[in-house]
Image: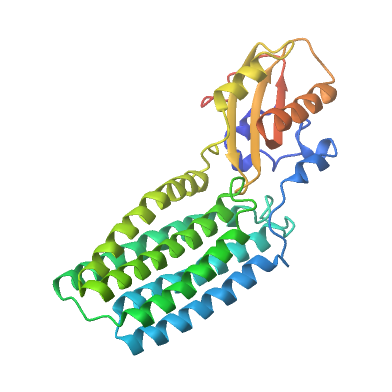
């Protein structure tokens, strides 16, 4: 068997002419794998979210200039980054539905991982900018027209919470959707902080409170974004997804009837929702393994969420795979 073609996940599915069958979706009518849906190209959440956030930006920029509020202008900049995040996530979700063709034998599902990574980076960069702005305002507080700031902030809270609610569905399963959800929820928290600070300033005249509250909120956002950024970076580097228990998968395969050894096991993400696997199973004295591979492919999806499994059965462990 041609084990050397499986030493890296990006080459595993490319060589179908070497005589070994694959226990993945295409060999066994694997239509059950498509229960992991990405957002369809006509998913209204992305377009609606973009429109709502552009509305927030326009309202807050106008109010910020009129009220001489740098806090509102900073919040508007943050909401403008939401538009970028939604465009990235929506475009990636649309790309994930495109069929594989040409050199892109895996299709475009990985675009959702890249979008989640970009979304996390944008959040961190914008948060850094907000902290710098707030620190400058701590040294040079500016008078805030609190009523106007509170009204504009309230608009931001309502729209951001409504947008976040739209993306609650699928946030646990898809890191790309979760990135959008966290982005919207974080912006709602920023707007709440702006409103609260403006209310206290209206009562006390403590203009320094506005940037202080902004810094505290940004730190909370950064803490929540770090997990998203780390997970999307791991997925971009073809690490096993957070929910994939690699030792349990290896133990399961090793315990299958007749299997004496499992090696060259790779588990990685084809997108933010689809998990792929390749492995070599040493199973002496067994020919005609189509049924066995099919059984394992279904079991791997049912137990571990692996939607694409490529399994190579070997009579003996050879020395043609030095990295295994």
Residue 194 horizontal/vertical position (percent): 35, 69
Q: Is residue 317 visible?
A: no
Q: Is residue 44 above or below residue 241?
A: below
In this picture, is 112 found above or below 162? Answer: above
Q: Residue at x 30, y 81 (%)?
A: 69
Is 24 displayed left or right of 140 in the figure? Answer: right
Residue 106, image x, y percentages: 67, 50
Q: Residue furthest left?
A: 139
| Front position in the image: 121 or 69 | 69
Residue 39 placed where, x, y %? Answer: 69, 58
Picture residue at 58% right of the left edge, 19% below the top? 319
Image position of 23 (left or right of 141):
right
Q: How many marks?
A: 0
Which picture quadrant has residue 244? top right
Q: How is the protein colored in the picture?
A: rainbow
Residue 214 locus on image (x, y percent):
30, 64
Q: Residue 167, located in which quarter of the rendered image?
A: bottom right
Q: Nearer the viewer, residue 41 or 256?
A: 41
User: Could one spot residue 306 in this view of the protein?
Assistant: yes
Image quarter hosting the C terminus: top right
- Name the residue rendered at 52%, 74% in the picture: 53
Q: Quadrant of the N terminus?
A: top right
State whether residue 41 is above or below residue 144. Answer: above
Nearer-the-camera pick, 15 or 253: 253
């Amino acid at each position: 068997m041609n084990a050397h073609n499986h030493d890296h996940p990006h080459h595993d599915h490319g060589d179908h002419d070497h005589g070994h069958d694959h226990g993945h979706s295409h060999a066994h009518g694997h239509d059950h794998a498509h229960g992991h849906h990405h957002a369809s190209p006509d998913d209204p959440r992305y377009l609606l979210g973009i429109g709502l956030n552009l509305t927030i930006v326009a309202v807050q920029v106008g109010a910020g200039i009129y009220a001489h509020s740098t806090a509102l202008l900073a919040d508007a900049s943050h909401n403008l980054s939401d538009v970028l995040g939604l465009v990235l996530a929506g475009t990636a979700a649309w790309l994930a539905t495109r069929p594989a063709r040409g050199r892109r034998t895996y299709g475009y599902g990985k675009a959702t991982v890249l979008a989640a990574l970009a979304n996390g980076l944008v959040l961190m960069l914008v948060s850094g900018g907000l902290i710098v702005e707030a620190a400058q305002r701590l040294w040079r507080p500016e008078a805030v027209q609190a009523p106007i700031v509170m009204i504009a902030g309230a608009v931001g809270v309502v729209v951001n919470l409504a947008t976040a609610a739209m993306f609650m569905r699928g946030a646990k399963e898809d890191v790309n959707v979760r990135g959008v959800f966290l982005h919207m929820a974080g912006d709602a928290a920023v707007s709440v902080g702006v409103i609260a600070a403006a209310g206290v300033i209206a009562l006390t005249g403590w203009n320094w409170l506005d940037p202080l509250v902004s810094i505290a909120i940004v730190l909370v956002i950064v803490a929540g974004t770090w997990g998203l950024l780390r997970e999307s970076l791991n997925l971009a580097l073809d690490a096993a997804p957070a929910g994939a228990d690699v030792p349990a998968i290896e133990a399961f395969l090793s315990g299958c009837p007749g299997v004496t050894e499992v090696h060259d096991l790779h588990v990685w993400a084809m997108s933010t929702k689809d998990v792929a696997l390749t492995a070599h199973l040493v199973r002496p004295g067994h020919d005609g393994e189509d049924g066995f591979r099919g059984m394992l492919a279904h079991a791997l999806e049912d137990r571990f969420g692996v939607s694409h499994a490529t399994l190579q059965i070997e009579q003996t462990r050879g020395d043609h795979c030095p990295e295994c």
